[in-house]
Image (cartoon, rainbow, N blue to C red):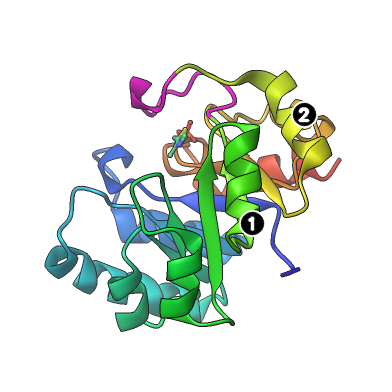
Amino acid sequence: MPDLPSIYLITDRKQIPQDKHFLRVLEELLAAGVGMLQLREKDLSAAELLPLALQVRRLTNKYSCRMLINDRIDVALAVDADGVHLGGHSLPPTIARMLIGPDKLIGASTHNIDEVFAATDQGADFVTFGPVFHTPSKAAYGEPVGLEKLQQACHQKTIPIYGLGGIKPENTPDVKQAGADGIAMISGLLCADSPSSSYHQFLKNFDF
Ligand code: TZP
């Protein structure tokens, strides 16, 4: 099983406060110690994503942070990312594994225990599970699954689970208590007044 960090940063450059710069916010978080990042910029075509992915690859290399690309296995290969993160509309993990090889990471988004089992059977290395709570990021992710469902999934899983969706410093200990191996976040890190302080707070609250 890969040794994964307890915090998984997911990007959405559109949520960056207007007075801030996406890559500078990322660099602040990487310098603070974020160890795994998913570049998730779903509105970009492959041609638009590639130059951004190359810039983020340079930063993640500089700070020894693992970088996964959401959905686009081709772009992940092109920038020599550490892996891909697959959603419900992506190629299945079995096919992704054939394409990216045995040494890369495959993450999968899940919303219920059946999806966790399916992702596990298909060779994913880890899953995100959620939304656990109401998320400020968008209603598009559906109704929150809640801590109880997370706990049930965590008790039955055999690969690491990251709780995702509406994770804040104050509910982080509950996610840990439910049995999650880590927490995955967009707004909690990217939109914080001080992203680096927020990262340290999350870390403290998760690894209590
Ligand atoms: N999948 C389920 S919830 C979510 C995704 C990508 C967004 C989580 O965003 P936030 O801002 O960390 O609540």
x and y percentages locating residue 37 in the rendered image: 50, 60
Q: Quadrant of the N terminus?
A: bottom right
According to the picture, the residue beneath numbered tag 2 turns out to be: 151
**Which segment is the magenta one?**
131-142
Residue 61 in view (yes/no) = yes
**Dot 2: within a 10 Å radius of its alpha carbon, few (fewer than 14), some, or many (20 or more) residues?**
some
In terms of depth relative to the viewer, which is nearer, 156 or 146?
156
Q: 80 left or right of 75?
A: right
In terms of depth relative to the viewer, which is nearer, 30 or 128?
128
According to the picture, the residue beneath numbered tag 1 turns out to be: 121
Which residue shows up at 58% across the image and 81% down it?
Answer: 102
Q: Is residue 157 magenta?
A: no
Q: Is residue 146 above or below residue 157?
A: above
- SS under mark 1: helix
x and y percentages locating residue 89 in the rendered image: 33, 47
Q: 106 left or right of 49?
A: right
Q: Is residue 141 magenta?
A: yes
Q: Amino acid at mark 2?
A: Gln
Q: Is residue 155 above or below residue 61?
A: above
